[in-house]
Image: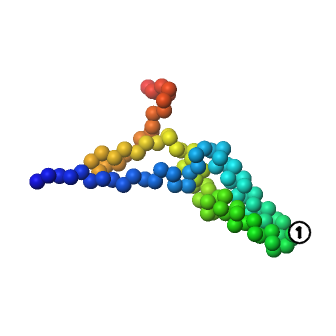
Amino acid sequence: MTVTPTKVPRAPETGFASTSVPRHLARGVIGFGLIIGSIALTPVIGPGALLAAPFGLIALRGCPACWTIGLAQTISRGRLKRECVDGVCTLTTARRPGAEARP
């Protein structure tokens, strides 16, 4: 009888994360700015100002909570490494090139 190794599905690489923290923060400024601006300008411009709110949600990739989760993912990217051996997965800190090992 032969045993075939089972493949463990990999976690998605991106999720809500951006490629860099400054880019993610810029998306947040644009998204929250459009949403807050559309609500604040409604008394001045009228209901047409609310047309900017959906563009703010697009910049945030759905909702403020999604943006917050993406910020946490963007900050932690590259700091943790997932390894799966024989169906058992562990989460360890990733070694960065040029970083010295601490005693």
The answer to whether residue 13 of the structure is visible from this angle is yes
Drawn side of residue 58 relative to residue 69, left or right? right
Q: Which residue is mark 1?
A: 44
Query: Count of labels shown?
Result: 1
Q: Nearer the viewer, residue 36 or 102?
A: 36
For the residue labelled by badge 1, is the local secondary structure a helix, a strand or a loop? helix
Counting from the top left corner in percent of width and height, residue 83 is at: 37, 44
Q: Is residue 23 above or below residue 47?
A: above
Task: Please give the name of the residue rendered at 75% of the width and 60% of the height, measured from the top-left corner.
Answer: 34
Q: Is residue 5 above or below residue 43?
A: above
Counting from the top left corner in percent of width and height, residue 32 is at: 72, 58
Task: Please give the name of the residue rendered at 75% of the width and 57% of the height, measured from the top-left corner.
Answer: 33
Q: Which corner quadrant holds the N terminus?
A: bottom left
Q: Is residue 99 above or below residue 73?
A: above
Q: Quadrant of residue 93?
A: top left
Drawn side of residue 102 relative to residue 51, left or right? left
Residue type at tag 1: Val
Q: Which corner quadrant holds the C terminus?
A: top left
Drawn side of residue 10 relative to residue 47, left or right? left
Task: Please give the name of the residue rendered at 69% of the width and 67% of the height, measured from the top-left corner.
Answer: 54
Task: Please give the name of the residue rendered at 47% of the width and 50% of the height, measured from the top-left corner.
Answer: 13
Counting from the top left corner in percent of width and height, residue 52 is at: 75, 65
